[in-house]
Image: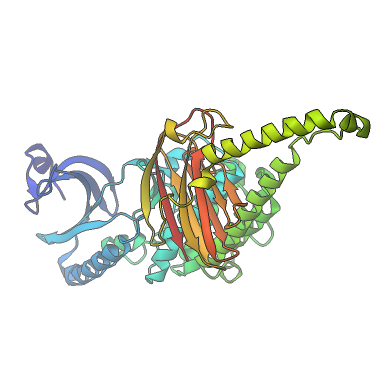
């Protein structure tokens, strides 16, 4: 084990990493904060030290360690998974060095029985499932998905998946009785040593239910936890304010029989995105229905003021055209920045020069992209400084989708939609509240 002497004397691990703080300790090893002395600015990183191995299993541990290091390096290609910076052996001890993710864990976010509303939970599930789909595409099962292994990254409010259970397998060599999973988040088959893709899907579904109810899944019914049906299914819908559509998705994710769950993460994502888009459509129709239309004017009044009305309407019409040309985001289509679909992230800032005149102190930017029929586009906007909102216009300049903030942190907005036709689409990014402005990130991708 790393000794107190190593910490006190500032010695370098692998002649490079200076250990500065013990983060966590457990049965599988220790986790430290360290500084990389061979990179400019000595950036902070995370060093995981796996517990010691007996001589008779050292060769097998070394083989597994090399394999898992390669696996983690491949997984780090996804922006919601920490990058592996190094892995090495020193005197029969194994070390992993990973990117440090600054932020709070989801466990801290959900502590004290905090309850989230449906829109933030849909966003949470979507953010968790995207990196999980990538993980499964690499032939890897996480095995230990729980709120403590999910970090809400401070710089962009994205969820980051950490602490893959596969690494712990190295530390359990010679003790096959140890099951790698966490109480409440692991499905029944995992406790019997069986694993599948649906085991991870189960854990994500449990997190969604916990977020909606504020109830920790490890509690039994006598402690205020969930009751079970005759089939052993979790009875939870009576403890949450949730639509039937989302309830059906979560219930299928957490079926006790793995064959009754979703077969892949993509299936869950497709149903969640359909649900999310339908909710955006319903919200927009509700906005339209609440608009108060002018009452009909009696015919005799129209006739009496026909000449004066004609003159007034002509003046107002000219003024409206002028204002629309001056302030409308639509007229800037030729000069709007172009978006490309490679997971591109652009930086921007809302400022006084981009004020929407009819809505005082509300600021916006406009981006343009060329879309193709039946292709799915994902647009995400994040900010640490204001409450963001997105509007997507079709080639006819009609609203295709809107989203006003679905993040628990109020710093994230997302649109996922299948494009109805070929043509030039506009993305309007703005502050959802008057007077709000600041820096933001916009990420676009197309499938």
Relative placement, left or right, of 55 versus 258 is left
Above or below, comparing residue 90 to residue 285 in the picture: below
Above or below residue 80? Residue 422 is below
Q: Exactly how many numbered labels are in the figure?
A: 0
Q: Is residue 103 left or right of residue 273?
A: left
**Residue 266: x and y, percent?**
52, 66
Residue 92 sits in quarter: bottom left
> Picture coordinates of residue 105 (x, y %)?
39, 43
Is 172 left or right of 90, judged from the image as shown? right
Instruction: Out of 102 and 201, give the one closest to the viewer.
Output: 102
- Residue ID at (24%, 58%): 84
Q: Is residue 151 left or right of residue 304?
A: left
User: Would residue 222 be seen by someone viewing this image from the given angle?
Assistant: yes
- Return the residue nearer the eye: 123 or 250: 123
Where in the figure is residue 311, as x and y percent of width and height?
74, 31
Relative vertical location of residue 164 with respect to residue 104 in this rendering, above or below: below
């Amino acid at each position: 084990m790393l000794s107190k002497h190593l910490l006190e004397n500032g010695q370098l691990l692998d002649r490079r990493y200076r250990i500065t703080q013990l983060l966590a300790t457990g049965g599988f090893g220790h986790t430290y904060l360290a500084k990389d002395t061979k990179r400019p600015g000595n950036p902070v990183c995370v060093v995981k030290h796996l517990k010691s191995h007996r001589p008779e299993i050292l060769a097998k541990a070394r083989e597994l360690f090399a394999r898992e290091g390669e696996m983690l390096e491949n997984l780090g290609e996804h922006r919601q998974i920490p990058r592996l910076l190094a892995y090495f052996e020193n005197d029969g001890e194994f070390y992993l060095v990973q990117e440090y993710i600054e932020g709070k864990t989801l466990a801290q976010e959900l502590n004290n029985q905090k309850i989230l509303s449906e829109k933030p939970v849909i966003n949470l599930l979507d953010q968790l499932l995207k990196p999980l789909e990538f993980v499964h595409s690499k032939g890897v099962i996480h095995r230990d998905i729980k709120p403590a292994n999910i970090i809400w990254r401070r710089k962009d409010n994205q969820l980051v998946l950490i602490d893959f259970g596969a690494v712990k397998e190295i530390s359990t060599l010679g003790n096959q009785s140890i099951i790698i999973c966490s109480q409440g988040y692991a499905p029944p088959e995992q406790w019997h040593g069986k694993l599948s893709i649906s085991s991870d899907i189960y854990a994500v579904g449990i997190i969604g239910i916990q977020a909606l109810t504020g109830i920790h899944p490890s509690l039994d019914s006598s402690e205020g936890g969930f009751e079970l049906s005759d089939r052993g299914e979790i009875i939870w819908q009576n403890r949450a304010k949730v639509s039937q559509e989302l309830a059906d998705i979560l219930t299928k994710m957490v079926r006790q029989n793995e064959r009754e769950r979703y077969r892949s993460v993509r299936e869950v994502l497709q149903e969640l995105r359909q649900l999310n888009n339908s909710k955006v459509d319903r919200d927009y129709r509700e906005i339209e229905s609440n608009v108060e239309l002018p009452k009909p004017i009696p015919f005799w009044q129209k006739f009496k003021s026909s000449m004066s009305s004609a003159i007034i309407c002509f003046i107002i019409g000219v003024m409206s055209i002028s204002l629309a040309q001056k302030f409308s985001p639509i007229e800037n289509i030729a000069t709007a920045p172009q978006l490309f679909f490679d997971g591109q992230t652009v930086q921007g800032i809302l400022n006084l020069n981009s004020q929407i005149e009819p809505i005082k102190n509300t600021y916006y930017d406009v981006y343009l992209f060329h879309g193709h029929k039946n292709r799915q586009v994902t647009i995400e906007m994040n900010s640490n400084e204001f409450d963001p909102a997105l509007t997507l216009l079709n080639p006819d300049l009609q609203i295709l989708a809107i989203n006003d903030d679905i993040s628990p942190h109020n710093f994230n907005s997302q649109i996922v939609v299948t494009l109805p036709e070929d043509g030039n689409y506009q993305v309007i990014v703005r502050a959802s509240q008057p007077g709000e402005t600041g820096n933001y990130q916009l990420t676009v991708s197309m499938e």
